[in-house]
Image (spheres, rainbow, N blue to C red):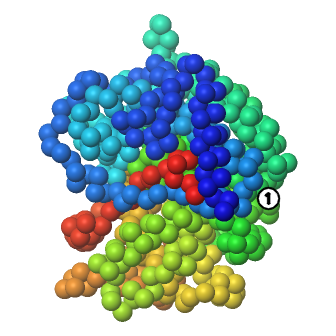
């Protein structure tokens, strides 16, 4: 009986929010289709050289959209109070601002580009990719006449000399929260995010303050206020610490400049993004016990002691959520199914991290992508071992494993993140992949994972590689999976039957490969061995003929690569 009233309440809330928007902001539709949406405010930014009005279209490109399976983000709101539902509407509006800012960082002004594409299917594909480059195909241009994507996106001038920059750039130019531009004399200068995007960030901060005034949970209220202040100062540590302290809030928002994957030139610059989430209380209770095992698992890592001398924070927690809105970097191309934050190494060492499992999106990828892939590529005798529980656990422990290993080099080369430059993100993803499986093994041996056989986790892990490697070489996760696939194949952990085209897992060799690959990655990270990592990536981060044929097989079967969302207030129950 309550749901019709709640639906009406949400609609009224949205109308009220729209009426309160700044005059400089343009109303956006909930689903953000290109026909209906407009940027909050188009700030001047460098766009890539092509005709911004009518880019040439050589064909319908319907097959490009088939790479994505549509999935609706929704959740039951019946356990939320009226004030909490108002907060959801406000947070979605703030997330839309992050979406605009990511367009400016990755491509340029959104609206002139999208309205110039007459073909509706191509326009939708461009919106999914936040520009004219296919994020699931190595950032290849899909609009004729468009130049190759600059790997530094819009974070740096397109004429930047990489070697000169590395030698002469100031600390501010290499900072996480600055754009690098040229002044009137042509000299490189650092412009802070909060200065460059001051109007949009002020609008987003104001929305977070409004949400905080309605928050019933004191920890959430404090976080929203501190995050608002962080957006307009680029000082995020206090809000990260407050975020770590939140334990009882039912609503979650992750918002700001967070990941560095978009900067493929150096991996220095963070990109704006947002998630709006609702906690799944039942599943979160099931996960709460695992964080306590982190110190023990760190001590038992299969690597020399000097590479595991750091102690992970013990205040880490695991929770499951329904995602109801993605924006900006998180919504570009392949979609995240789990979150491990904050990235600040000092916060990680002090308090650990929080791991957020996005259960509804995970379920969608399992059913729409992983199971069909297994039916094509996994030997029939092992298909029964591809299970959602194993997929959930492997994904969850991938995120937990980001907190294991080493954050600072052992030879005074600074943080691993800066020592390995643009290779830091893909090798960190590779570390999380392999140490996550190492954790599964250990916890299974300890009797702490009660559901399934160890082969469930191994086989689902292998099927997951085929899913993730399709993200392409421009994705940190895609490269990490290529390295892992080639390593396991060389070690005999994966075997391939040429006649059937099927793969199988060898459990004994799999366990040995997990240990040796863990040691290899942790050693590279601890030494800050950029040259060694680059040589490894150049040699093994490639799709070989066998894997290429396998990927072609699943593409011909019409299996989507990832998901695209229907999202917004109108889709919530």
Front one among 487 and 209: 209
User: In the visual, does 204 lie left or right of 225?
Assistant: left
Outermost residue to the front? 1
| Residue at screen point 56% across, 42% down | 273
For the N terminus, the image quarter is bottom right
Q: Can residue 272 be seen in this view?
A: no
User: In the visual, does 530 lie left or right of 379?
Assistant: right
Q: Position of residue 41 (x, y in %)?
A: 51, 23
Q: Where is residue 100 in the image (x, y as percent from the top left)?
A: 50, 32
Front one among 224 and 426: 224
Q: Can residue 446 be seen in this view?
A: yes
Figure quadrant of residue 399? bottom right
Figure quadrant of residue 58? top left
Label 1, on which residue? 247
Outermost residue to the left? 58
Q: Is residue 37 above or below residue 246?
A: above
Classed neighbour count for the residue bearing mark 1: other residues with Cα under 10 Å, few (<14), some (14–19), many (≥20): few
| Residue at screen point 48% across, 7% down | 184
Outermost residue to the bottom? 381
Front one among 4 and 103: 4
| Residue at screen point 27% across, 70% down | 554
User: In the visual, does 532 lie left or right of 8?
Assistant: left
């Amino acid at each position: 009986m309550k749901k019709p009233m709640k639906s009406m309440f949400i609609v009224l809330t949205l109308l009220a929010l729209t009426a309160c928007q700044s005059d400089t902001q343009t109303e956006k539709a909930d689903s953000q289709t290109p026909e209906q949406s407009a940027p909050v405010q188009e700030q001047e930014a460098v766009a890539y050289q092509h005709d911004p009005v009518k880019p040439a279209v050589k064909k319908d490109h319907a097959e490009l959209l088939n790479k994505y399976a549509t999935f609706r983000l929704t959740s039951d709101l019946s356990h939320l109070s009226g004030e909490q539902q108002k907060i959801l509407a406000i947070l979605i509006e703030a997330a839309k601002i992050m979406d605009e800012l990511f367009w400016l960082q990755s491509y340029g002004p959104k609206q002139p580009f999208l309205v110039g594409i007459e073909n509706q299917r191509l326009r939708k594909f461009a919106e999914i990719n936040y520009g004219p480059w296919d994020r699931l195909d190595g950032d290849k241009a899909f609009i004729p006449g468009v130049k190759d994507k600059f790997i530094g996106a819009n974070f740096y001038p397109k004429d930047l000399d990489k070697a000169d920059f590395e030698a002469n750039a100031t600390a501010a130019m290499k900072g996480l929260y600055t754009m690098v531009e040229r002044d009137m004399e042509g000299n490189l200068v650092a412009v802070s995010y909060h200065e460059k995007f001051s109007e949009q960030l002020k609008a987003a901060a104001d929305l977070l303050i409004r949400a905080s005034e309605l928050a019933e949970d004191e920890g959430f209220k404090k976080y929203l206020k501190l995050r608002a202040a962080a957006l307009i100062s680029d000082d995020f540590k206090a809000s990260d610490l407050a975020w770590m302290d939140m334990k009882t809030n039912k609503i979650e928002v992750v918002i700001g400049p967070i990941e560095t994957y978009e900067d493929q030139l150096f991996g220095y610059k963070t990109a704006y993004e947002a998630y709006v989430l609702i906690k799944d209380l039942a599943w979160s209770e099931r996960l709460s016990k695992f964080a306590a095992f982190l110190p023990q698992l760190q001590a038992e890592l299969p690597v020399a002691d000097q590479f595991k001398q750091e102690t992970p924070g013990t205040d880490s927690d695991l929770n499951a959520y329904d995602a109801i809105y993605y924006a900006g970097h998180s919504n570009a191309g392949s979609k995240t199914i789990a979150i491990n934050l904050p990235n600040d190494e000092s916060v990680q060492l002090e308090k650990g991290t929080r791991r957020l499992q996005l259960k509804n999106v995970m379920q969608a990828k399992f059913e729409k992508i992983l199971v069909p892939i297994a039916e094509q590529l996994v030997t029939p005798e092992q298909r029964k071992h591809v299970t959602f529980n194993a997929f959930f656990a492997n994904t969850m422990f991938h995120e937990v494993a980001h907190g294991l290993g080493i954050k600072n080099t052992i030879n005074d080369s600074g943080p691993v993140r800066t020592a390995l430059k643009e290779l830091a993100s893909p090798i960190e993803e590779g570390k999380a992949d392999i140490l996550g499986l190492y954790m599964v093994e250990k916890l299974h041996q300890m009797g702490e994972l009660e559901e399934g056989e160890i082969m469930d986790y191994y086989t689902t892990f292998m099927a997951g590689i085929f899913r993730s490697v399709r993200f392409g070489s421009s994705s940190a996760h895609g490269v990490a999976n290529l390295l892992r696939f080639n390593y396991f194949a060389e070690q005999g952990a994966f075997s391939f039957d040429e006649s059937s085209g099927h793969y199988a897992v060898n459990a004994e060799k799999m366990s040995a490969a997990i240990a040796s690959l863990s040691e290899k990655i942790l050693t590279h990270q601890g030494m800050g061995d950029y040259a060694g990592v680059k040589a490894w990536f150049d040699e093994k981060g490639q799709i070989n003929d066998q894997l290429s044929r396998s990927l072609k097989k699943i593409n011909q079967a019409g299996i989507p690569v990832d998901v695209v969302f229907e999202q917004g207030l109108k889709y919530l129950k």
